[in-house]
């Protein structure tokens, strides 16, 4: 039902007191007497009789005050929202349009605009029809009156629209909605199976274990310990905010110094950042850490090209394993001792992947919602696939590879932006197994602004579709088992990378608003409400502290389907944006409050004593110049929010559909469309990450 504006049932009413009594007389000559309540002489005086006119007036004023206060709160919220829209869209104050290349997303934006204009036109007809009393045409088998019964051209147009809607528009929409609902149910079943697998793992306490002392040598001298040679790589590009804490964490790994080499792979094109990273490397080199700084003059292939260039060095041949950490990752000192031992006596093992944990997950609403998604990804998807299939997608960081597995699988290739998934699929096709360690956690960051998160998600969803086109022939012709091929094609790529953004965008952002104007193709309530809430509940189980955010999570995931769908189409058809790589902006938050402060104090001493002995005069003068610039640097300007046209257009489309749902008295549809439209509006105005904790 549509929301009622009657506030009279908000307060309790005076109930009639007294119990009905039936009295049966002994003399049958008397009939049965039924008394509704106490006798009038003994009946207590009603409270209302004791009230004078002044008291009644005060009670009415109090009730009116409560009702007006509720309406005022709702009005103030929408007034503030409209004020923000006016400020950002009309006066263009503190607004920067989203920088998109010409043609990128233009077709999708045009389609959404066409839907919006059509919906506004139909809404105008529906409002006029409702006010004129024509809304009795709600039966799919419409009775179209004769021309002699039709009065007025507008009435004729409306009745014609009802006929065309029932005969020509509703069937294709209903067919598409049934197809999307079927995909939705298949994906929901997959999520449920993964969740049951996770429960089984926890119930049976299944996890990879290390047998005995892995570092003890098999030589005659039993006291000797053998540590394999490990190469640690830190690829980075213009990571001014996080380079220091990342290098510091890696250089403090608990591993013999002569068995460890750290490669800092810097692709920065900013000379000031290059000198800062060089100084950090020189500081740890003076402390006895075996660390090397590498910089490419030409940045080809992005991260894949950087890793490929580093693996081509001759000294890499002396190392057996390679650990990879992105610039914002801070591994614990015992990371290598918890991961490398799993390779011993397991020659088929190619990868050991650790879990991510986030230092800024409680920073704002956006980071909280990301934490929900990533916790489910690691706790459920990665862990279940690792235990039962020995395969999952490499996350690109916080993992240890056997160098032999990389070489036999073809090494790093520059053909896609998801080089981590590419090497994982090729290694799986070559028979290598993977292990996921849910107990080994590495600190990192999640994007704190919607702009950075949007670019990251575009790369994460366009790359897999691009990779699917490239890997499909190799998967079909590979020698692995048929069920493994089916898992790769149907589950790993199609269901979780293609179907999910397709049905989410089509079902909740296009079909649902259209069904408000085409009631013959109406979606059932369980598709709109019950199943999505249940699936969201399953997604939140790995992070139970996020349960209060289940509704924002559901709405935000539907909102992000626009970006994911656009990226999926871009990657599948190899459009220009499918090979874009934008480095995710970091905030540089540390796991410990005093980490940066202690590093700063230490650098003041080390710069004078140790760096001077390891750096040339030109480098020292450049470092002094950079230090002066850093001290004289102005206060950073507040981040300017952007507006996104596709999200704003969809917001108005959903809000238009919510108005139409009021005319047809569909309460559940109204609330869902209203809240989803407001979420699209907040995201379109880039407000979702503004300290909304």
Image (cartoon, rainbow, N blue to C red):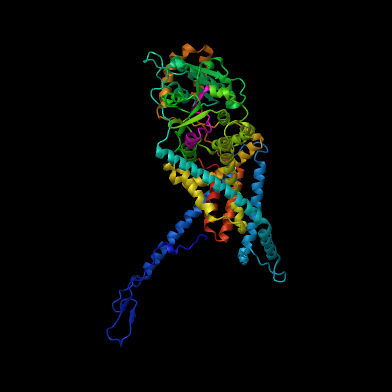
Residue for point 52% across, 46% down: 188
Was residue 93 drawn as part of the magenta stretch in this picture?
no
Report x, y in % for residue 17: 33, 71
Residue for point 58% across, 22% down: 308
Above or below 29: residue 89? above
The answer to which quarter of the image holds residue 238 is top right
Q: Nearer the viewer, residue 13 or 246?
A: 246
Report x, y in % for residue 274: 54, 21
546 displayed left or right of 578? left
> Can the viewer see residue 453 in this picture?
yes
137 displayed left or right of 68? right
Report x, y in % for residue 475: 61, 33
Above or below 435: residue 25? below
The answer to which quarter of the image holds residue 591 is top left
Q: Nearer the viewer, residue 305 or 259?
A: 259
Q: Which residues are magenta?
A: 383-403
């Amino acid at each position: 039902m549509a929301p009622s504006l009657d506030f009279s049932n908000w307060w309790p009413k005076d109930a009639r007191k007294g119990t009905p009594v039936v009295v049966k007389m002994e003399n049958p000559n008397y009939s049965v007497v039924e008394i509704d309540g106490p006798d009038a002489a003994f009946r207590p005086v009603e409270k209302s009789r004791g009230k004078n006119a002044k008291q009644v007036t005060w009670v009415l004023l109090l009730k009116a005050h409560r009702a007006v206060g509720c309406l005022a709160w709702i009005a103030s919220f929408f007034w503030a929202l409209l004020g923000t829209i006016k400020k950002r869209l009309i006066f263009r104050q503190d607004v920067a349009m989203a920088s998109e290349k010409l043609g990128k997303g233009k077709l999708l934006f045009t389609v959404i605009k066409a839907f919006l204009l059509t919906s506004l036109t139909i809404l105008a007809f529906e409002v006029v029809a409702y006010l004129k009393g024509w809304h009795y045409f709600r039966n799919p088998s419409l009775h179209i009156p004769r021309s002699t019964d039709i009065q007025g051209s507008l009435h004729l147009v409306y009745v014609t629209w009802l006929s065309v809607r029932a005969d020509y528009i509703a069937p294709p929409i209903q067919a598409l909605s049934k197809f999307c609902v079927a995909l939705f149910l298949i994906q929901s079943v997959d999520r449920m199976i993964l969740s049951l697998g996770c429960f089984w793992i926890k119930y049976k306490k299944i996890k990879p274990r290390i047998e005995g002392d892995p570092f003890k040598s098999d030589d005659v001298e039993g006291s000797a310990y053998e540590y394999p040679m490990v190469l640690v790589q830190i690829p980075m590009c213009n990571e001014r905010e996080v380079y220091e804490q990342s290098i510091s964490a890696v250089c403090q790994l608990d591993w013999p110094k002569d068995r460890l080499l750290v490669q800092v792979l810097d692709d920065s094109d900013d000379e000031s950042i290059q000198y800062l990273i060089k100084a950090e490397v020189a500081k740890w080199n003076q402390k006895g850490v075996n660390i090397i700084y590498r910089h490419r003059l030409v940045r080809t292939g992005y991260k894949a090209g950087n890793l490929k260039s580093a693996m081509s060095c001759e000294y890499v041949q002396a190392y057996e394993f390679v650990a990879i950490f992105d610039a914002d990752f801070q591994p614990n000192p015992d990371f290598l001792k918890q991961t490398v031992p799993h390779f011993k006596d397991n020659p088929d093992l190619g990868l050991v992947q650790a879990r991510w944990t986030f230092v800024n997950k409680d920073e704002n609403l956006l980071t909280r919602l990301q934490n929900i998604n990533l916790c489910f990804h690691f706790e459920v998807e990665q862990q279940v696939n690792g235990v039962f299939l020995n395969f999952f997608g490499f996350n690109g960081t916080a993992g240890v590879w056997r160098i032999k597995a990389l070489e036999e699988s073809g090494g790093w290739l520059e053909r896609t932006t998801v080089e981590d998934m590419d090497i994982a699929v090729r290694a799986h096709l070559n028979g290598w197994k993977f292990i996921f360690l849910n107990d080994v956690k590495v600190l990192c960051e999640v994007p704190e602004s919607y702009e950075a998160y949007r670019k990251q998600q575009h790369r994460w969803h366009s790359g897999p579709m691009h990779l699917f086109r490239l890997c499909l022939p190799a998967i079909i012709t590979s020698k692995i088992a048929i069920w493994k091929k089916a898992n790769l094609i149907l589950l790993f790529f199609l269901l979780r990378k293609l179907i999910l953004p397709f049905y989410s965008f089509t079902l909740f952002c296009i079909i649902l608003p259209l069904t408000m104007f085409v009631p013959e193709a109406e979606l059932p309530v369980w598709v709109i409400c019950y199943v999505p809430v249940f699936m969201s509940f399953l997604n939140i189980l790995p992070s139970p502290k996020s349960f209060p955010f289940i509704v924002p999570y559901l709405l935000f995931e539907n909102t992000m389907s626009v970006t994911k769908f656009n990226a999926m189409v871009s990657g599948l058809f190899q459009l220009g944006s499918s090979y874009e790589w934008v480095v995710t902006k970091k905030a540089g938050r540390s796991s410990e409050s005093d980490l940066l402060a202690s590093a700063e104090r230490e650098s003041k001493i080390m710069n004078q004593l140790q760096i001077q002995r390891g750096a040339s005069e030109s480098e020292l003068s450049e470092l002094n110049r950079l230090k002066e610039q850093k001290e004289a640097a102005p206060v950073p300007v507040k981040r300017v929010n952007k507006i996104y046209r596709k999200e704003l257009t969809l917001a108005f489309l959903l809000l238009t559909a919510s108005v139409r749902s009021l005319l047809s008295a569909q309460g559940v549809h109204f609330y869902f469309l209203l809240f989803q439209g407001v979420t699209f509006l907040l995201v379109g105005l880039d407000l979702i990450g503004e300290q909304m904790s």
